[in-house]
Image: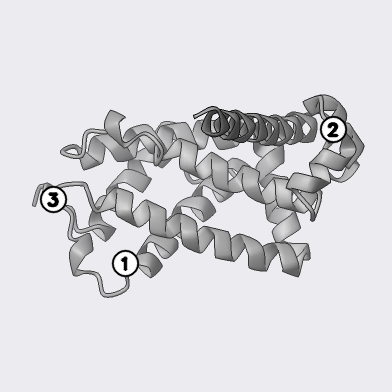
């Protein structure tokens, strides 16, 4: 019993340190910009050693940035909190999630810009992020199939459908934040994304 408790404690300590490293990276990007942040900056901000940063993230900054991008998506869509989601209200969930997504990306715009730039210039990061995204899409699929009145079960390649849908969401929000011309407000953008999503998902509750 004592060994199990020690193992759980070590696991919690490890997870807490990893979270601190990721949070430190997010804060520093907003303050200094991604290119100016060093691993020593991250270690100091997180309150850990520089060696520990590389122990958990051997590839350094790109690996931490990758985890940041995945975590932001999971948090926005509540994948880790299914008990707080009303699976009978797909439109309501979409609206709440997309409002949070736009607000988060606006708040941490430098993080999203850094992630986009890094993915374009670093092939290794892009490949690893794509693999992580695939796993993430699988998690999203098991989450979204629980919603009532959608036809996701009829889609031949559900994982690819999720990936393409998220690409449309991400690209549209990115464009809006960079060039806010088509939509005068974030609310108008969310209205359009919800309507588009309901049609793509063939939501049965849509009014004819």
Pick the residue in front: 1 or 80. 1
Is 106 placed left or right of 182 in the picture?
A: right
Q: Which residue corresponds to mark 3?
A: 149
Give the mark nearer the N terminus: 1 vs 3: 3
* Real-space Cα separation, disc 1 to disc 3, in angstroms: 16 Å
Compared to 110, does 143 lie above or below? below
| Residue at mark 2 | 43
Q: Position of residue 188 (x, y in %)?
A: 39, 37
Image point 25% across, 51% down: which residue? 198
Of the numbered discs 2 and 3, the one sitting upstream in the chain is: 2
Q: CA distance from mark 2 to mark 1?
A: 40 Å
The residue located at (74%, 69%) in the rendering is: 123
Q: Relative to residue 2, is residue 109 depicted above or below?
A: below
- CA neighbours of label 1 inside 10 A, class few (<14), some (14 to 19), many (20+): some
Say which of marks 2 and 3 sits in front: 2
Residue that appears at 65% across and 33% down? 19
Task: Report if the CB atoms under discs 1 and 3 are less than 8 Å apart.
Answer: no
- Rate crowding at label 3 as few (under 14), some (14 to 19) or many (20 or more) other CA atoms within 10 Å: some
70 and 99: which is toward the camera: 70
Query: Label 3's element?
Result: loop
In the image, residue 121 sits, relative to residue 116, either above or below, namely: below
Residue 158 marker: 1
Secondary structure beneath dot 2 equals helix
* Quarter-of-image position of residue 20: top right
Residue 183 appears at what percent x and percent y? 46, 41
The span from disc 2 to disc 3 (Cα, nearest Å) is 47 Å
Which numbered tag is attached to residue 144? none
Query: Closer to the camera, 182 or 120?
Result: 120
Q: Which tag is nearer the camera, tag 2 or tag 1?
A: 2
Left or right of residue 19, residue 89 in this image: left
Front one among 70 and 52 = 52
């Amino acid at each position: 019993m004592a060994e199990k408790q020690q193992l759980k404690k070590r696991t919690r300590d490890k997870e807490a340190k990893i979270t601190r490293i990721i949070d430190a990276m997010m804060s520093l990007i907003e303050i200094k910009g991604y290119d100016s942040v060093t691993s020593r900056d991250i270690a100091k901000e997180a309150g850990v050693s520089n060696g520990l940063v590389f122990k958990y993230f051997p590839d350094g900054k790109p690996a931490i940035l990758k985890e940041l991008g995945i975590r932001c998506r999971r948090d926005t869509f509540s994948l880790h909190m299914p008990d707080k989601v009303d699976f009978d209200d797909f439109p309501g969930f979409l609206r709440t999630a997309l409002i949070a997504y736009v607000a988060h990306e606006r708040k941490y715009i430098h993080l999203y810009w850094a992630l986009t730039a890094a993915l374009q210039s670093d092939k290794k990061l892009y490949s690893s992020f794509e693999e992580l995204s695939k796993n993430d899409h699988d998690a999203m699929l098991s989450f979204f199939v629980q919603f009532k009145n959608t036809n996701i079960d009829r889609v031949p390649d559900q994982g690819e459908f999720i990936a393409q849908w998220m690409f449309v969401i991400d690209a549209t929000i990115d464009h809006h934040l960079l060039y806010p011309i088509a939509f005068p407000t974030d609310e108008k953008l969310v209205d359009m994304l919800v309507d588009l999503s309901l049609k793509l998902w063939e939501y049965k509750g849509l009014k004819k």
